[in-house]
Image: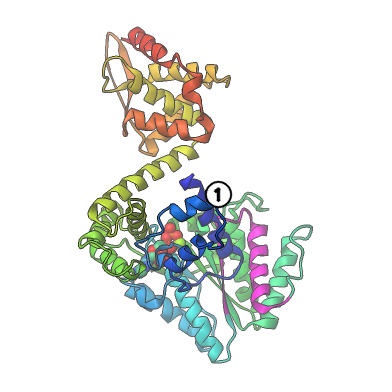
Amino acid sequence: MELKSRAFAVEETELLLANGPRRFLYSVPETERMTDAGNGGDGVSGDPIRERFETGSRETVFRNKRLLDPETIIDADRIVGRDDQLDQTIGYLRTVLNGNRAPDLLLHGPSGTGKSLIINSVSETAAELAHADGTDFVPIEISCQKVTSYDRAIYNIVQQAAKAADVDVGVPRKGVSTDRKIDRLFEIVSNEFDAIMVVLDEIDLLTGSTSPNDAPAYSDVIYQLSRTTQLGLEDTDVSIAALTNDPSFMEDLDSRAFSSFNPEHITFPDYDATQLQAILDRRRDAFKDGVLGDGVIQLCAALGAQDHGDARQAIDLFRKAGEVANHDNAETVTDDHVRRAEEEAEREATLLQMQGLSAHKQIALYATAAVAGYARDDIDTIPNKVAYNVYTFVTDTLDIESKSQHSFLRYMKEAETYGFVRAQKHGDNMKGVHKYYTLANDPEVVLDTLEDASRLAGVAEETPDIKAVVNAQLAEFN
Ligand SMILES: Nc1ncnc2c1ncn2[C@@H]1O[C@H](COP(=O)(O)OP(=O)(O)OP(=O)(O)O)[C@@H](O)[C@H]1O
Ligand SMILES: [Mg+2]
């Protein structure tokens, strides 16, 4: 439940980001909103929902929780540890203020290293400064994870350009060619603006297959957007800022796109613990005065850096620690809350990954965990053959067609790439060489998690004989 509502909240804000005005930090304090929600005050009694609202805890350790929302664009004075990247980005965008076209940019680095933050903050400020100088420079951002094809991406850009110019979109979403939409985009840009910068966030995810020439969709988007420069269209300065974790996407650009897109590279390395600590420290006012235990920020930063220096993860952990404290009705946030938040985050991450697997992959992993979980004698390693036979038992019971042993091996290979299992081969001349798995997590945790996953809901009740099957299969194998 908790997970679902969180997912919805994220989707909602991302949609806003993709399609509409960005969300800036408003300073409505959390406490104010919470109090509004709880204060009915008209004396209606006997309403059980209302009563629960009233008697439930309304205390919170947060003062302004939005500061810890990953979608909030924070004020510039809260940005720490990205001086080089800021200097470079500002240097490139300064050209707009001089009336010239900004160069294309490629911002690359691992997740949570500030790519979206820096390009959004710098381009917004550039737009304000340009505007004050009488230059209409407009940044347009699309989140490529949300658009499925070349046509959709272009339409999304037209929509945003039209909105920023306060003119009609002028082309329908469906029923006209993408070329018509591009023409309309250039028309809006040349009539209404001096320059635009299209920010293609997570560009490598724009791989939609409708591309006419088999190249990934981002290749066509890049080619079309850089055509203005090639054609030398007057008054139509279009620059591209591509953001990615994986700069190798450049290898799949078709030759036309490749030759027209020569971006300036800006690299975003991981943060270290000291930088993460400074980032969190500048958001300590998300919490009420005096509620943060001494070591809390340091611990969140240390745990964040341990993984891979992702600021999003560290901020999430900081927020979650506060939520755990609220849940406990605690007045202060302690190291223990941070550790519990960390455990919860790990469980959620594993759950999300496992839930993302297809049904057969989930059943394959479930069957493998069942072997370890239900074996009468403790076993260190799970024979592939036994796991496969349990898998066919589960699929048969659920009335799903079993896939081949070969497919099963592929499913488990994927489980291995996610780190859910490790595989090794061993054996002897007598029994032959066999493949074995070791689970990364406790088998009960894997079984519980998958039983919670929508695809396998109720699987435990439907397979009451699984324990007997596991032990019969193990006996046969040994
Ligand atoms: N240098 C920084 N100072 C303050 N906050 C930061 C900094 N870098 C990142 N953050 C915060 O961390 C979160 C993630 O940053 P951002 O979205 O910019 O990462 P990203 O590099 O775009 O990641 P991804 O590749 O996953 O899209 C945001 O909430 C952002 O405000
Ligand atoms: Mg990003």
Name which quarter of the figure residue 371 lies in. top left
Q: Position of residue 467 (x, y in %)?
A: 39, 15
Residue at 78%, 60% (x, y): give it: 176
Residue at 30%, 58% (x, y): give it: 309
Q: Position of residue 79 (x, y in %)?
A: 35, 73
Q: Residues within 10 Å of mark 1 (few under 14, many from 20)?
A: few
Q: Is residue 74 magenta?
A: no
Question: Magenta residues, as a range?
Answer: 138-167
Front-lying residue, 95 or 57:
57
Name which quarter of the figure residue 429 lies in. top left
Q: Is residue 165 magenta?
A: yes
Q: Position of residue 321 (x, y in %)?
A: 32, 55
**Badge 1 element:** loop
> Which residue is under mark 1?
46
Q: Which residue extends farthest left?
A: 294
In the displayed structure, 44 sits above or below 97; it is above
Q: Amino acid at mark 1?
A: Gly
